[in-house]
Amino acid sequence: MRVLCLLLLLLSIGFGSAFAGPGDMAVSLYAGQLTGNKWDDFFSGEEVASEDSYLLAATLARRLGGYKNLLSYEIEGQVVRHFKLQEHWEFNALGVLRWEPFFWDEWLETSAAFGMGLSYATSKPEVEIENDGDSSQLLVYWMIELAIVPFAGRPELELLTRLHHRSTGYGLFAHKGGSNALAVGLRYRF
């Protein structure tokens, strides 16, 4: 937990400012619904088994650099509130790789991202216990995201869709637990 708090503090006071320029900071707000699915079910055509559990996440991210105009790397901190079937807070700190160029960017600016880090829940998540028999407060966090810039003349605003995933890390952090949420939201870059 101390590591997560330290990462969020460093991010908020401008860690990495020597690498970042104008527009390299971003705040996002997204909402999602938890599912009973495993993460790979979303790519195999399985029916989504929605849970009556929701999350609302606020994020702060900083772009640290990139490779040519192809790939950028960022750090991100998240504060997540869960409600309905489970009522707890979740704090995530992660590194993110973002693929920037797509051939249709001239018509619809698009990026795809993958991020991985740590997730701390203030209590054992009830949905994870219900789906897997047990869980742990500290797990691996990863996400997959697709973002677009839908508003002409407003490149700082992005719509995003994200798979929000807590994981045991194949037994590294716990033997049982983990959850998935499908989420949509809005990002503002500054």
Image (cartoon, helix red, strand yellow):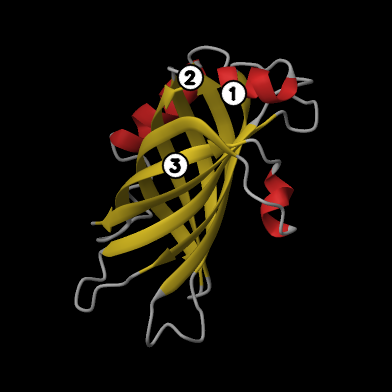
Looking at the image, residue 76 lies above or below residue 187: above
Q: Using the image as rendered, state which of residue 143 and residue 176 is in the foreground.
A: 176
Is the residue marked by circle 2 packed among few (<14), some (14-19), or many (20+) residues within 10 Å? some
Kindly identify the residue that appears in the image at 51 percent across and 16 percent down.
1
The residue labelled by disc 1 is 127
Is the residue marked by circle 3 packed among few (<14), some (14-19), or many (20+) residues within 10 Å? many
Q: CA distance from mark 3 to mark 1?
A: 14 Å
| Marks 3,2: beta carbons within 8 A | no
Looking at the image, residue 72 lies above or below residue 172: below
Q: CA distance from mark 3 to mark 2?
A: 13 Å
The residue labelled by disc 3 is 32
| Left or right of 81, for residue 151 | left
| Left or right of 30, for residue 47 | right
The amino acid type of the residue labelled 1 equals Val
Q: Using the image as rendered, state which of residue 187 and residue 18 is in the foreground.
A: 187
Kindly identify the residue that appears in the image at 62 percent across and 48 percent down.
48
Q: Position of residue 67 (x, y in %)?
A: 53, 68
Looking at the image, residue 45 lies above or below residue 118: below
Q: CA distance from mark 1 to mark 2?
A: 7 Å
The residue labelled by disc 2 is 86
The amino acid type of the residue labelled 3 equals Gly
Q: Position of residue 190 (x, y in %)?
A: 23, 57
Q: Earlier in the sequence, mark 3 or mark 2?
A: 3
| Marks 1,2: beta carbons within 8 A | yes
Q: Using the image as rendered, state which of residue 178 and residue 188 is in the foreground.
A: 178
Q: Earlier in the sequence, mark 3 or mark 1?
A: 3
